Image (cartoon, helix red, strand yellow):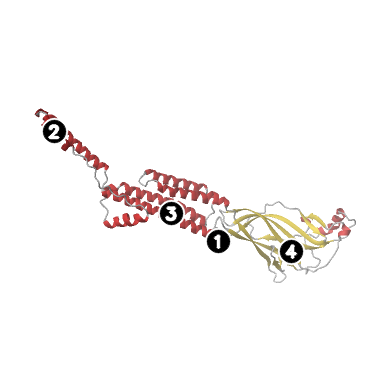
C-alpha cells in the first residue's frame, strides 16, 4: 500500500489487486434496468471490488471541517468538531456505458457496497452525526461516499495564551484490515487542523471589567488616607472583584500543569487591590498615631521632607511664625482698675477683684483650647512624612501596573502573530 497527502488535505491509500475491466449490461436506458444490472454486484459487497487480488485499490480521503462546536476546557484534551469525510475508490464491478444505461451517475444504498474501514484514531466518543444511507456510483467505476462526522477527539491544547491561543490538533486515519503492499504494516496518515479561538467573549467579560476595577482602585488613592471611607471603599472593591471572578470561573480553562497568562493577569489584579488596601491600612494607622511620636530624626526629615517631597511634588507648607497677639485679660483689668482708681471712689475694690478673677479663668481656658487645637511641630512633620509615603507608593503602584499590563499585552500580541 502506498500513501500520500496533498495540500488540500486529501490523501490516497493504495491496496494490492489485479486489474480487469468489465461492463454492466442494461436492457433499457432507465434507472430500473440499471438497478437490475447492479443486483449481481450487490452480492459481492463482502469482498474488495477487484477481479484480481493483486490489483491496487486507491482510496482517496478528503476531509472538510465545517466548524468547531467547542472545546471541553475542563478536560483540556478533547475537541468537538463537525467535519465531512469524503472517500473515493474504484469498483471494478460497477462500470457501465452511460449511453446504454441512460445515466452516468446513480445513488445506491451503502450497505450494498464494499466499504473501507477507515477510522480516526483520536476518536474519544461515538459518532452521533446522522448517517447518510446512500453512496454514488459513477459510470467509470468510481464510488463516492460522503459522510458527516461529529468528531469528539483527543487534542492536546496549549492554553498559555488563552484566550488568544491557536491550537493545532491532529487527526490520524487508520485501517486495521488493509495493509501496505510494501511492508504489510497498518495504514496510518495524520493531518493537522488549526483552531483559532474567538477571543471577543473573554475580552468583554473578563479583561475589560478587570481593567475597569483596577482603574477605580487607582482613583481611590484620591480619597484622604486618614479617612475610614478609603479603607472601606477598597475592601468593598476587593469583595466585588472576588465575587466577579467566582461568577466568571466557568469561562476560564482548567489550568492543569500549565498556567494560562490570563490567570496571571487576573491574579495580579486581585493582588494589586489587596496591596493597595494594606498600604491604606498602614498609612492610616501611621497618621492617626502621629501625635504620639517624638520628633523625627534629622536624616528622616531630610530624606522625606526635602528629597522625596520634591520628587513627589508634595512640599511641606511653611509655618506661620507671626503669633497672634492676644492681650492678657489681667493686664487689661489692671489698666482699667487704675483708671477707676483715678476717677472713682475706693469703694469699687470688690468689683476689681471679681474682674481679676474672671480674667485668670479666661486665660486658663484660652491656654487649654490652644493646646488642643494647635498641632505641634513634631506632629506636623510626621503627618507630612505619611502623606509623602502615600504619594510615593501611589506612583510606584501606577508604574508597576502599567509595566505589567504592557508586558502581558506584548506577550499576547507577539505570540498570536507568530502562530
Dot label at residue 398: 3
> In the rendered structure, which disc, 2 or 4, sits on the residue that comes first in sequence?
4
Q: Which image quarter: residue 300? A: bottom left
Observer-side mark, 3 or 2, equals 2
The span from disc 1 to disc 3 (Cα, nearest Å) is: 26 Å
**In this rendering, would 75 be left or right of 86?**
left
How far across and down, in percent of the image, does residue 93 sit? 82, 62
| Residue that label 2 marks | 339
Circle 3 residues within 10 Å: few <14, some 14–19, many ≥20: few
Viewer-proximal residue, 343 or 124?
Answer: 343
The residue indicated by pointer 1 is 415
Q: How much space separates mark 2 and mark 4, taking CA atoms?
A: 132 Å
**Mark 4 in CB contact with mark 3 (< 8 angstroms):** no
Question: Is 23 rendered above or below residue 128?
Answer: below
Earlier-in-chain disc, 3 versus 2: 2
Which residue is depicted at the point 32% across and 56% down? 306
Helix, strand or loop at disc 4? strand
In the rendered view, does 31 fall on the left or right side of 310? right
Amino acid at each position: 500500500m502506498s500513501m500520500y497527502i496533498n495540500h488540500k488535505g486529501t490523501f490516497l491509500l493504495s491496496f494490492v489487486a489485479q486489474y480487469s475491466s468489465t461492463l454492466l449490461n442494461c436492457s433499457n436506458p432507465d434507472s430500473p434496468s440499471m438497478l437490475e444490472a447492479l443486483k449481481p454486484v450487490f452480492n459481492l459487497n463482502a469482498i474488495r471490488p477487484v477481479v484480481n487480488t493483486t490489483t491496487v485499490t486507491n482510496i482517496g480521503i478528503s476531509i472538510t471541517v465545517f466548524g468547531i462546536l467547542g472545546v471541553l476546557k475542563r478536560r483540556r484534551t478533547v475537541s468537538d468538531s463537525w467535519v465531512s469525510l469524503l472517500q473515493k475508490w474504484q469498483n471494478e464491478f460497477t462500470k457501465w456505458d452511460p449511453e446504454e444505461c441512460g445515466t452516468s451517475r446513480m445513488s445506491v444504498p451503502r450497505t450494498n457496497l464494499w466499504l473501507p474501514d477507515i477510522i480516526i484514531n483520536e476518536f474519544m466518543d461515538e459518532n452521533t452525526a446522522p448517517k447518510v444511507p446512500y453512496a454514488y456510483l459513477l459510470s467509470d467505476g468510481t464510488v463516492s461516499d460522503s459522510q458527516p462526522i461529529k468528531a469528539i477527539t483527543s487534542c492536546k491544547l496549549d492554553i498559555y495564551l488563552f484566550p488568544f491561543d491557536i491550537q493545532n490538533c491532529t487527526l490520524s486515519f487508520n485501517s486495521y484490515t488493509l495493509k501496505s503492499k510494501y511492508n504489510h504494516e497498518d495504514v496510518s496518515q495524520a493531518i493537522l487542523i488549526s483552531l483559532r479561538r474567538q477571543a471577543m467573549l473573554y475580552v468583554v467579560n473578563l479583561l475589560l471589567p478587570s481593567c475597569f476595577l483596577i482603574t477605580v482602585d487607582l482613583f481611590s488613592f484620591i480619597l484622604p488616607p486618614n479617612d475610614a471611607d478609603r479603607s472601606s471603599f477598597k475592601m468593598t472593591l476587593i469583595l466585588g472583584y472576588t465575587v466577579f471572578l467566582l461568577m466568571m470561573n466557568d469561562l476560564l480553562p482548567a489550568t492543569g500543569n500549565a498556567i494560562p497568562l490570563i490567570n496571571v493577569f487576573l491574579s495580579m489584579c486581585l493582588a494589586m487591590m489587596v496591596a493597595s488596601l494594606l498600604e491604606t491600612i498602614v498609612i492610616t494607622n501611621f497618621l492617626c498615631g502621629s501625635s504620639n511620636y517624638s520628633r523625627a530624626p534629622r536624616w528622616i526629615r531630610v530624606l522625606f521632607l526635602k528629597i522625596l517631597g520634591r520628587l513627589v511634588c508634595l512640599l511641606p507648607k511653611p509655618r506661620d511664625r507671626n503669633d497672634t497677639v492676644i492681650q492678657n485679660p489681667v493686664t487689661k483689668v489692671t489698666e482699667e482698675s487704675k483708671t477707676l482708681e483715678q476717677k472713682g471712689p475706693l469703694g469699687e475694690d470688690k468689683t476689681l477683684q471679681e474682674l481679676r478673677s474672671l480674667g485668670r479663668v479666661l486665660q486658663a481656658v484660652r491656654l487649654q483650647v490652644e493646646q488642643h487645637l494647635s498641632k505641634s511641630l513634631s506632629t506636623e512633620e510626621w503627618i507630612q512624612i505619611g502623606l509623602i509615603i502615600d504619594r510615593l507608593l501611589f506612583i510606584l503602584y501606577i508604574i508597576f501596573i502599567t509595566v505589567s499590563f504592557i508586558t502581558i499585552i506584548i506577550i499576547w500580541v507577539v505570540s498570536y502573530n507568530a502562530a
